[in-house]
Image: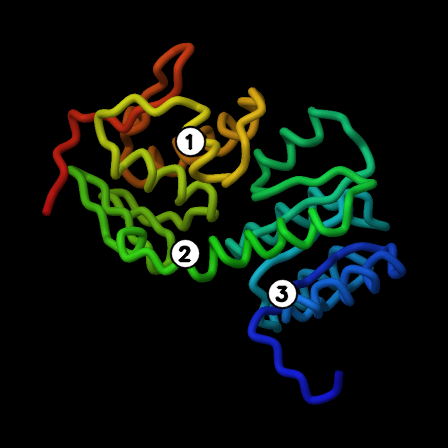
Amino acid sequence: MAGVIYLNNVLMIDDDLRLCDVIKKAMAAEDVALDFCESGLEGISKLKSGNYQAVVLDVMLPGMDGFETLRQIREFSNIPILMLTARTDSILKIEGFRTGADDYLTKPFELPELVVRILSLIRRYTVFNGIEEVNAEICFDGLKILPDDRSVHGEFGICELHPKEYEILFFLAKNQGKILTKQSIYESVWKDEYIYDDNNIMAVISRLRKKLQTVTNMNDYIETVKGVGYRFNKKYRRQT
């Protein structure tokens, strides 16, 4: 509709233009504008010059594939990214999460599910649900967690976190010393029913630990409680 101004904009990188057009109409019904392009290079160019709140990225792209596109996006942006693939290979899914994807959906999918997932990404990562607690800075010995830009600060530098990295770290930090099950972490961060698939959590925590070690030179802020879950190390004194 001419003259309509949308508050939220999503970029879809997929060479299936008919699918893009269908999803564009579905998102418009939710007051979200969908822009799309056919290649990773064009998508990266659009992201650098445009204002988007989320990305839908197909794995199978002509030329540069979705994984390489994702890697290059993560060099300059923490925008939430949902990956699409026609393959059900769990190894590909794990690779996507390790590279920095925030969500994953296998083709063929139900259109309403995709729409809900996109809206969820926008809601969680650009608005933070309006919860004041999420916007509170948290400081520990040697580590500062800042919500404004989802970054961690330490003696050895600063690292920006991907949205799910930040959400997991925040959830662990605010429950310092408590053992949090994988199920509780998954349901809190992914806002979905836990289906006994630990790969998502493990991939994100692996990336998160590396970033924490980079800025603090310490590797034990997040402890693994074998067979149960994870815990934010209580030896690090929280500062007020």
Quadrant that contains the N terminus? bottom right
Q: Residue furthest left?
A: 240
For the residue labelled by badge 2, is the local secondary structure a helix, a strand or a loop? helix
Residue 162 image position (x, y, % from top left)? 47, 47
- Measure the alpha-carbon separation of dots 3 and 2: 21 Å
Residue at 16 percent across and 31 percent down: it is 236
Residue linked to disc 3:
47
Give the amino acid type for the residue marked by disc 1 in the picture. Answer: Ile
- Tag nearer the camera, 1 or 3: 1
Q: Are marks 3 and 2 in contact (CB under 8 Å)?
A: no
Q: Is residue 48 left or right of residue 24?
A: left
As rendered, which of 120 and 37 lies closer to the eye? Answer: 120
Residue count near mark 3 (Cα–Cα under 10 Å), binned few <14, some 14–19, many ≥20: many
As rendered, which of 237 and 186 lies closer to the eye? Answer: 186
Please identify the quarter of the rendering in which residue 226 is found. Answer: top left
As rendered, which of 177 and 153 lies closer to the eye? Answer: 177
- Measure the alpha-carbon separation of dots 2 and 1: 17 Å
Residue count near mark 1 (Cα–Cα under 10 Å), binned few <14, some 14–19, many ≥20: some
**Which label sits on residue 85?**
none
Residue linked to disc 1:
185
Residue 209 image position (x, y, % from top left)? 39, 31
Give the amino acid type for the residue marked by disc 3 in the picture. Answer: Leu
Up-down relation of residue 168 to residue 232 (above or below): below
For the residue labelled by badge 1, is the local secondary structure a helix, a strand or a loop? helix
Q: Is residue 36 left or right of residue 136?
A: right
Q: Are marks 2 and 1 in contact (CB under 8 Å)?
A: no
Residue 127 image position (x, y, % from top left)? 43, 61
**Which label sits on residue 128?**
2
Residue at 30 percent across and 24 percent down: it is 231
- Tag nearer the camera, 3 or 2: 2
